[in-house]
């Protein structure tokens, strides 16, 4: 009898589905692992913090669960220091607020003091202040854009930005006698006029600087890595930016068209033809683009101002406000007395209080001052633009990737000197 029984082959095991089984197995393993959050210190000594600030970051994997911005490492007691010297002697302290655009701090402080006294400075001095401010606006934005490119992997844009910065610094040194802390300007005008041939040098410098800005623009604005790291990261809504007190290019990146040079013109800005760039999303990419475009607008302003600047005095001819000319000091008793009283006692500012603001590179630089009628400030308070901007970082970055923190911190352009004072 034939054997009809046939051996049954064992069932062929199904191949594992990489889309389900592998991940399920991984999830099962992770469920039994003991995990905890990691704490990372970024700063206070870190190349990407752009200032002495500590960011205490609490990580859940690669995501930021909590972040604490700790300042205070650079505090110099700016406001109390100003209350112990004459009004003019405050100027070197203002340089250190934002050491990348010192002239803007000098002129903003002087503008507030002059408003408290009720002075209108000579027209030529107003033009010089506009020219100096816009040169330093370009200088400040080059620093921000160049550092942002470098910290996201682009060293060439950083070199181009630094080259352009050096060219501007050469012109600033010729104008003020210093490269970084300028101590330029005086109550009632300027402490010196434009050097001979300086205007022509500035035009040539701007030609080269704009070439370099266009190089940086070409290298970064359409670079896939740079765009991926900055676009749709570090987003803040316009409403939140206003609530936090943002101003300047960071606020304008959110779509808010607010620039003090247009909203409340000072000096001769109302005679200048320039545009105020405005963004859409309020992300890191928009904040970067704001600075690229603002450099081009500053270039327009400087060229117009150099064409329009009139001849004339650069400081008031009032020995109660400005130092007498040296021949008068050396040759007359009145000159000696006026010089002595201004240096030793300071300009006698009428009793009162004032708030005045200018459009600095990072936003509204405001000054609240109180005078008791003496030659020294009774109270000086500075509303630095960087402080409210830095305060919003936890709101922006919480829950986002750790990698997003670097471009976000770059594009808000935190300057330790003005944040801590």
Image (cartoon, rainbow, N blue to C red):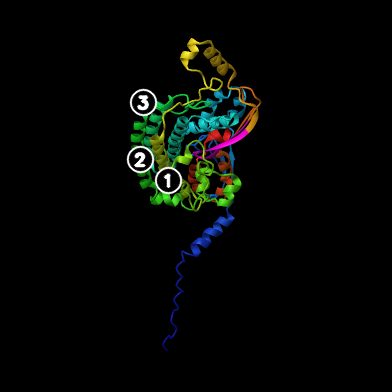
Indicate the secondary structure of the residue bearing disc 2: helix
Q: Which residue is mark 3?
A: 196
Mark 2 vs mark 1, foreground winner is: 1
- Pick whichever of labels 3 and 1 is earlier in the sequence: 3
Residue 414 falls within the magenta-colored stretch: no
Query: Which residue appears at 53% of the width and 16% of the height?
Result: 339
Find residue 195 and report its image quarter. Answer: top left
Query: Which residue appears at 44% of the width and 47% of the height?
Result: 289
Magenta-highlighted residues:
354-369
**Placement of 22 over or under 338, stated as above or below:** below
Indicate the secondary structure of the residue bearing disc 3: loop
Mark number for residue 155?
Answer: none
Cβ atoms under marks 2 and 3 closer than 8 Å: no
Cβ atoms under marks 3 and 1 closer than 8 Å: no
**Placement of 382 over or under 29, stated as above or below:** above
Indicate the secondary structure of the residue bearing disc 1: helix
Q: Which residue is mark 2?
A: 212
Residue 38 seen: no
Q: Main secondary structure of the magenta part?
A: strand
Residue 348 seen: yes
Residue 368 falls within the magenta-colored stretch: yes
Q: Residue 309 at what x, y percent from top left?
A: 41, 33
Would you call the spot at circle 2 few (<14 residues within 10 Å), some (14-19), or many (20 or more)?
many
Residue at the farthest bottom position: 1
- In front here: 27 or 356? 356
Mark 2–mark 1 Cα distance, whole angstroms, equals: 13 Å
Mark 3–mark 1 Cα distance, whole angstroms, equals: 30 Å
**Placement of 140 over or under 234, stated as above or below:** above
Q: Residue 69 at what x, y percent from top left?
A: 58, 40
- Pick whichever of labels 2 and 1 is earlier in the sequence: 2
- Pick whichever of labels 2 and 3 is earlier in the sequence: 3
């Amino acid at each position: 009898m034939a054997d009809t029984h046939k051996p049954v082959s064992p069932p062929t095991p199904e191949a594992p589905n990489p889309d389900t089984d592998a991940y399920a197995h991984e999830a099962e393993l992770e469920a039994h692992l003991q995990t905890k959050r990691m704490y990372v210190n970024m700063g206070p000594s870190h190349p990407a913090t752009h200032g002495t600030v500590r960011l205490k970051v609490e990580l859940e994997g690669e995501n930021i669960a909590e972040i604490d911005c700790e300042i205070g490492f650079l505090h110099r007691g700016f406001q109390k220091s100003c209350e112990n010297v004459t009004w003019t002697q405050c100027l070197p302290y203002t340089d250190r607020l934002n050491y990348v655009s010192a002239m803007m701090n000098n002129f903003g402080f002087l503008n507030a003091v002059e408003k408290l006294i009720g002075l209108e400075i000579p027209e030529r001095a107003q033009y010089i202040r506009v020219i100096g401010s816009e040169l330093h606006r370009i200088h400040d934005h080059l620093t921000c854009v160049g550092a942002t490119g470098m910290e996201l992997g682009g060293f060439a844009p950083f070199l181009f930005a630094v080259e352009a910065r050096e060219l501007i610094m050469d012109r600033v040194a010729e104008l003020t006698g210093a490269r970084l802390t300028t101590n330029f300007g005086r109550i009632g005008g300027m402490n010196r006029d434009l050097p001979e041939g300086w205007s022509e040098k500035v035009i040539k410098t701007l030609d080269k600087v704009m070439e370099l800005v266009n190089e940086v623009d070409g290298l970064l604005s359409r670079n896939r890595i740079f765009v991926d790291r900055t676009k749709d990261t570090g987003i803040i809504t316009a409403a939140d930016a206003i609530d936090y007190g943002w101003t300047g290019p960071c606020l304008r990146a959110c779509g808010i068209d607010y620039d003090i040079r247009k909203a409340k013109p000072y000096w001769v800005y109302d005679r200048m033809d320039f545009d105020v760039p405005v963004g859409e999303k309020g992300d890191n990419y928009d904040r970067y683009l704001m600075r690229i475009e603002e450099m081009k607008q500053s270039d327009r302003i400087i060229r117009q101002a150099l064409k329009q600047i009139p001849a004339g005095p650069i400081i008031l001819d009032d020995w109660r406000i400005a130092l007498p000319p040296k021949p008068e000091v050396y040759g007359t008793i009145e000159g000696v007395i006026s010089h002595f009283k201004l240096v030793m006692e300071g300009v006698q500012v009428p009793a009162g209080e004032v708030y005045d603001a200018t459009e600095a590179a990072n936003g509204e630089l405001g000054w609240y001052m109180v005078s008791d009628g003496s030659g020294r400030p009774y109270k000086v308070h500075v509303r630095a633009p960087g402080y409210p901007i830095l305060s919003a970082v936890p709101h922006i970055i919480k829950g986002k990737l750790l990698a997003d923190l670097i471009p976000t911190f770059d594009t808000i352009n935190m300057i330790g000197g003005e944040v801590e004072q």
